[in-house]
Image: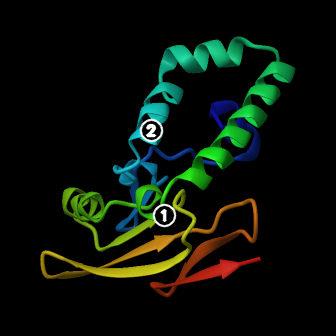
Amino acid sequence: MGEAFASATGATLLADPSIVDGTLLMHGDTLCTDDLDYQAWRRTARSADWQREFLAKPVVLRRETVQGLREKSKAVIQAKTAEIMDVNDAAVAAAFRHHGVTRLVHGHTHRPGVHRIMVDGRRCERWVLPDWYGRGGYLEIADRKPRLVRW
């Protein structure tokens, strides 16, 4: 998504990470520091050169590329342990410390729910959003109380 999408829909694009109302929002993939192969791919896919080359291709080729990447991703995921693909506890604690928050919301790791931890004597909660390929959902925060809503 980019500025054209935001303009057309009235959405506001947030930087990754962002803090909104004292809650740290992030994609979550940077917390998976034990998955070295993924981190290398992430650096490639987020590089301006790779994105420029990819977006210069016709839509048909981009769709084929994305489909191929998804198929490759499924195969790679099957070969990895859950521990490698999940967040690294030290990276999570570092994010809480660095941003000075006690609530973190992210996706990517596909283990939806709330994970409560202590960081430097502070009670912290990490909310993981469900993915969009199965039973999606979102986090609702009303009256300062969060709850995971699935559809």
Determine the CA span between mark 2 and mark 1: 14 Å
Looking at this rendering, what residue extends furthest in the right direction? 60
Q: How many other residues sit within 10 Å of disc 2, few (<14), some (14-19) or many (≥20)?
A: few
> Which residue is found at the position 42% from the left and 56% from the top?
84
- From the top left corner, tell me how far across and down residue 94 is, in percent: 22, 59
SS for tag 2? helix
Which residue does the numbered mark 2 point to in the structure image?
A: 37
Find numbered disc 1 in the image and state the secondary structure of the residue it sits on: helix
Left or right placement of residue 25 versus residue 60 in this view = left
Image vertical order of residue 21 relative to residue 66, above or below: below
Q: Quadrant of the N terminus?
A: top right
Residue located 81% across and 29% down the image: 63
In terms of depth relative to the viewer, which is nearer, 66 or 25? 66
Q: x%, y% of residue 17?
A: 40, 50
Residue type at numbered disc 2: Asp
Side of 134 relative to 31 (left or right): right
Q: Residue at x 44, y 61 (%)?
A: 86
Q: Earlier in the sequence, mark 2 or mark 1?
A: 2
Do the CB atoms of the residues marked 2 and 1 lie less than 8 Å apart? no
In the image shown, does 86 or 43 lie closer to the viewer? 86
Give the quadrant of residue 99.
bottom left
In the displayed structure, would residue 121 be above or below residue 54?
Answer: below
Percent position of residue 16, x then y: 44, 46
Q: In this figure, which residue is indicated by the disc labeled 1?
A: 82
